[in-house]
Amino acid sequence: MPPRGKIYCKKIAGMYNVWCLKDFNKLIFKQMNFIYENVNYKINASGIVPSVGDIDEASKTILVDRGIPEKFHQGIAVHEIEERKLLMKGHSYVYSHNEAQKKELEFYKKTYGDEDALKLLEEEENLVLDICLHRTAPKKSKIILTESENSNQSPLKPIIEIKNAKETIFENKRYLIDNSERLIGTLVDVYEKGKIVYIDRDVPERFHENLALNELVTRKNLRKGMGWTMAHAEGNKIEQEFLNTKYGIQEGQEIFNDENKFQAWKFTNEKKH
């Protein structure tokens, strides 16, 4: 089974006009209650969720994209809950995702039996990937040029620095860079406990620094309790700022766009195979 849609959608999170977690008190949603491991959750499927599934830990709300049929909502909720537990412990996304998928399958088996549960999960996977692949033409947030083009503004100190091909430094922490393997469904992953950044072996080296920064910022914000949508949006924002500072507005934006084109190409080819 290919990984769930979050890793296909992660780079475009925040690029759509989706409702924000901060607006919960301003909007009225149709929600359903869901009890998992004696904890009360709400499942909200009223909006566009770039990662298809997400979780707002503060309000115990599972966010499901409105294009997902209701029969998958509880399974996705289980997946998001279990995945976030492992990420918060410092595991890599791929490991956390795979373990969460096992839990989701177990949940489906209790309701539908072994054979039907597997079919249901496969149907869900295909639907999620289709939704995400239709969103791989990025709609980038606009860059405000006035501040960036201010000639009196001092260059910012880089917030990430690659010392060599195998090591990167982020917020005074050293991470090994491992780009020896092929990653399925993602270009970059972080194993916090082992201080390793995994980058797909097909990714051009000029994207390594940017991808590592984006993913490390995303993980940092997940640990703060953000959902995937907001955490990825912050990762994209910091990556763009970093590229603009290091290369200038025009070249920085070109690199960012090229990175996203490469990602879209890679994921499209994975879908074909």
Image (tube, rainbow, N blue to C red):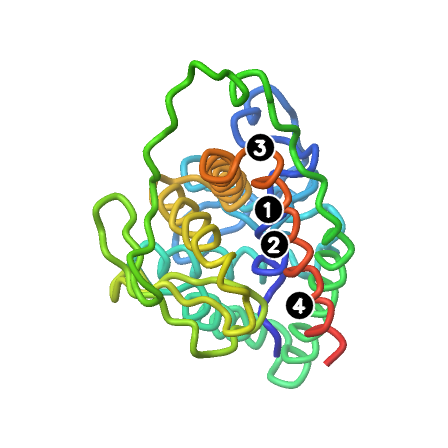
Q: Which SS class for mark 1? A: helix
- Amino acid type, callout 4: Lys
Q: Residue at x 29, y 62 (%)?
A: 167
- Amino acid type, callout 3: Ile
Whole-angstrom CA distance, mark 1 to mark 3, is: 11 Å
**Residue indicated by mark 4:** 266
Locate residue 226: give its quadrant.
top left
Crowdedness of circle 4 by 10 Å Cα count: few (<14), some, many (20+)?
some
Please determine whether, in this image, residue 58 is positioned above or below residue 73. above
In this rendering, the count of numbered labels is: 4
**Residue indicated by mark 2:** 259
Crowdedness of circle 1 by 10 Å Cα count: few (<14), some, many (20+)?
some
Q: Are marks 2 and 1 in contact (CB under 8 Å)?
A: yes
Q: Earlier in the sequence, mark 2 or mark 4?
A: 2
Q: Earlier in the sequence, mark 1 or mark 3?
A: 3
Seen from the viewer's position, the closer of residues 151 and 232 is 151
Q: Give the mark toward the camera: 3 or 2.
A: 3
- Amino acid type, callout 1: Phe
**Residue indicated by mark 1:** 256
Please determine whether, in this image, residue 26 is positioned above or below residue 200. above
Q: Earlier in the sequence, mark 4 or mark 1?
A: 1
- Image quarter where the N terminus lies is bottom right
Please determine whether, in this image, residue 8 is positioned above or below residue 272. above
Residue 3 shown left or right of residue 162 in the figure: right
Q: Are marks 3 and 2 in contact (CB under 8 Å)?
A: no
- Image quarter where the C terminus lies is bottom right
Residue 85 shown left or right of residue 271 in the figure: left
Q: Residue at x 43, y 46 (%)?
A: 218
Please determine whether, in this image, residue 194 is positioned above or below residue 231. below
Residue 181 shown left or right of residue 68 in the figure: left
Crowdedness of circle 2 by 10 Å Cα count: few (<14), some, many (20+)?
many
